[in-house]
């Protein structure tokens, strides 16, 4: 069961779902909404983490439009994955957007990690979606400060200690 929490912001309140979710369709829809909310709320930082982003809507026009509206000075976007092969193969619009905004994007790769160990998370300072069961596509969405802090610390541990730079915005040929 999900609840809706109203978060005050410039331009009026945004409704953010909280509680448990289950199912791939719900997961994808909440990710779409998360990117739109980030642009509307003006969050300074977004961190996304997944083994390969296979089932994320990163290449959809609406997601890219939201990212374009969100991107700007003082913003930070961090990605963590085992591999970016699926991003390159499935999300061409995102790959182009990433090249344009490479100065605000950090991509980290944890190639040796078990794909089921990598957190599947969309995090911002105001809201988090965490997929706890990737196979069944089930998890939680929250605005609770303690969850926001705990998930951020988990992601920072992976970014700093369990990954290396990955997914360059351009590749140089010889």
Image (cartoon, rainbow, N blue to C red):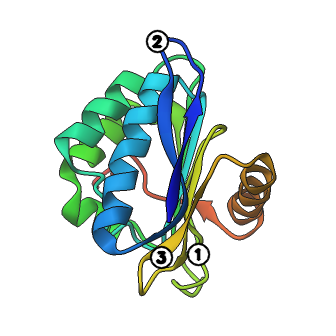
The residue that disc 3 covers is 138
Q: Position of residue 52 (x, y in %)?
A: 40, 71
Q: Nearer the viewer, residue 158 or 63?
A: 63
Spatial CA span between label 2 and label 3 = 32 Å
- Quadrant in which residue 93 is drawn: top left
In this image, 164 relative to 98: left or right? right
In this image, 54 relative to 129: left or right? left
Q: Residues within 10 Å of mark 2 (few under 14, many from 20)?
A: few
Q: Secondary structure at mark 2?
A: loop
Q: Position of residue 24 (x, y in %)?
A: 32, 72
Q: Nearer the viewer, residue 22 or 107?
A: 22
In this rendering, which labeled residue sits more in front, label 1 or label 3? 3
Instruction: Kindly tell me whether residue 14 is visible in this rendering.
Output: yes
Q: Is residue 58 above or below residue 81?
A: above
Q: Residues within 10 Å of mark 3 (few under 14, many from 20)?
A: some
- Quadrant in which residue 161 is drawn: bottom right
Q: Is residue 57 above or below residue 50?
A: above
Q: Residues within 10 Å of mark 1 (few under 14, many from 20)?
A: some
Q: Nearer the viewer, residue 133 or 13?
A: 13
Q: Which mark is residue 101?
A: none
At a point 63% along the width and 38% down the height, the residue shown is: 126
Q: Secondary structure at mark 1?
A: loop
The residue that disc 1 covers is 118
The residue that disc 2 covers is 11
At a point 75% along the width and 63% down the height, the residue shown is: 154
């Amino acid at each position: 069961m999900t609840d809706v929490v109203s978060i005050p912001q410039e331009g009026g309140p945004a409704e953010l779902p909280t509680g448990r979710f289950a199912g791939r369709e719900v997961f994808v829809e909440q990710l779409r909404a998360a990117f739109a909310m980030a642009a509307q709320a003006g969050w300074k930082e977004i961190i996304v983490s997944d083994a390969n982003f296979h089932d994320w809507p990163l290449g959809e026009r609406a997601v890219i439009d939201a990212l374009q509206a969100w991107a700007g000075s003082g913003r930070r976007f961090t990605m963590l994955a085992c591999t970016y092969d699926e991003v390159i193969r499935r999300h061409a619009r995102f790959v182009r957007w990433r090249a344009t905004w490479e100065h605000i994007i950090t991509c980290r790769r944890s190639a040796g990690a078990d794909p089921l160990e990598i957190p599947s998370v969309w995090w911002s300072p105001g809201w988090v979606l965490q997929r706890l069961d990737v196979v069944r596509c089930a998890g939680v969405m929250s605005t609770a400060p303690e969850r926001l802090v705990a998930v951020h610390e988990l992601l920072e541990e992976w970014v700093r200690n369990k990954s290396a730079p990955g997914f360059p915005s351009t590749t140089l040929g010889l």
